[in-house]
Image (cartoon, helix red, strand yellow):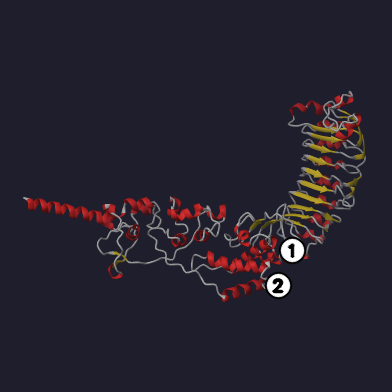
Amino acid sequence: MMNGLFSFSFLASLTVSSWLLCSTKSDAAPPSQEECIECDDIATPWMLTNGYTCETAPNWLFNNRCNQSPNWNKNRYCSKSCYDWGYSYFGGSQHCCPGCSVCDDIPSPQMTPAIGYTCGHVTNWEANGATSWLLNRCRNKNEHWWRNKFCKSACARLGFGYPGINCCPFTPPEESESLRSEWIALIQSRSPSTMFDDPTSAQYLAFDWLVKEFLSRTTTPSLEYDDDEVTQRFAAATVLLAFKADTAKEDLLRSSYWASFPIETLSIPRSWKFYLYPPVGSIPKEIGLLTSITSLDFGYYVAPEGTLPTEFGLLTSLTYLNLQISDNSGTFPSEFWLLTNLATLKFYNSGSAETIPAAIGLLTSLTDLSLSGMAGTIPSEIGLLTSLAGSLSLTGMTGSIPSEVGLLTHLEYVELYGSYFYATSRLSGSIPTEFGLLTKLEGLIVEQNALTGTIPTEFGLMTGSRDFYFSHNDLRGTLPSEIGLQTMLEQLFLVDNPLLAGPVPSELGNLVNLEILHIYNTSLTGSIPSDLCDDVGSKQQWWTAINCYEIECNCCHAADDVGCKAFPGEYWCYETPCDVLLQGIPP
């Protein structure tokens, strides 16, 4: 009887021990290669239906299946992955034969667009300034990372590889003179004048960075840069280093603060906005290598020194350019006008004034044009830019407004500012009657010029206009009654036109949408139509500034430099109601 009990206890113990051996993780070292089993990774029907493979399955599946599931045990599903997870189907000395896969390094969507990190940053996260969460994505992978297997090679190199994936050891490519020679030859074949002799030059530093960046970021042995990637990444680095020579090079090339893309993550830049302040240096000729770039924005504060290099004309893919130049010569190279795909051109010259050449007429794709700090006359070729449909803004010009501006019938805004400080930088002559052809125009600004003549009656054709700025000119004649046809008009400025005379037309009362009316330092007389005052209560704002002594108005306010004359010693008479002013009551 005792022997029977002993036998039963022994068998029960053996059964429990065998079950534990098969259903728990084993820390025993794998036996020799001769005893291994060729394991496969066959997914279950449920996994296939739900889009999983043994490599992409979530971690909970392995923790609750493998050798703990009778069905999995019977069919040996995901035998390689289960073995790698520590839930082997095999007991004793049996184990899966070792093998490895060439692992890729695909960053998560949150890495590249949002913060500009690559899987290469993970492998050297402290030196590359990566935040701790990025490293923890390898150490503590969430479900999103488990499913997509992001940064497989990088995580494996850190010792936090994905179970079921045995990445082959990665050996980074060795730097060689042949690599440098090959790339130098490539760059110089596209930019023959680029030299690498000066170790302090932007070109030398950019090339050195390019080689080292390639060697340190390449986590897939088969990865190579194509010719465009080499030349355009080099060009991007050269431009950055030329602008910010006083900044630590590694910080400049790493941080997305300095430009809207970090050049480690984009092989070929296509849109680029600078945030450099204050800028240092001039635009290097290597910018001409960025042949795929479509948008280039140097921002408000970025004013490179020197003139534009002739290589700028190679950027034929550009559709958007915003550029400010601070120099003492300020000349457009003739090659600049080859950029015929430009749709938006914004240029500000804070150095010596630049003239607008007749070649501006070649940029027939322009929809928006803004040129500031310019000099000379407006060329008649401006009329060739018939695609202009947004705004035309020119400041500091002289001479007359060409009648060809009337050909730009799609324009919505025209801004022709004169110089506040320099009388020699102001437009003269009369306002062309051809402005009446711009029936889509919403705003016209011709302030601070020396324009003479009358306000054309043809302005009555522009019935969609909202803003008219005629202040600070030498306009004469009367305010035409056709102004009453501008029923959409919201703002009307006629300040400092002393020769503008005659009565205020009664048709002004038709401007039911008018909210801002400035009429002073003119010779206009009469009264503001009562219809305007009747609608004041329904307007979002009613901001007026008139000469209350010359023009009668029951709902208007005095202009500051007119109203204060009645009260010596007062320094703020602006917005004093006319009836208060005329009663002699101090504001």
Under circle 2, the secondary element is loop
Q: Give the residue displayed 44% in from the left and 53% down from the top.
A: 141
Q: Is residue 294 left or right of residue 357?
A: left
Q: Position of residue 199 (x, y in %)?
A: 66, 70
The Cα–Cα distance between marks 1 and 2, rounded to whole angstroms, is 21 Å
Give residue 169's position: percent from left, percent from top.
43, 67
Residue 424 location, x and y as percent?
90, 52
The secondary structure type at the circle numbered 1 is: helix
Q: Residue type at mark 2: give it.
A: Ser
Question: Which residue shows up at 82% across the image and 32% down it?
Answer: 544
> Which residue occupies the foreground of this view, 428 or 96?
96
For the residue pair 262 and 72, the one nearer the viewer reads as 262
Q: Label for residue 193?
A: 2
Q: Earlier in the sequence, mark 1 or mark 2?
A: 2
Q: How many marks?
A: 2
- How many other residues sit within 10 Å of disc 1, few (<14), some (14-19) or many (≥20)? some
Q: The C terminus is located in which quarter?
A: top right
Task: Tell me the number on the disc at residue 338.
Answer: 1
* Viewer-side label of 1, 2: 2
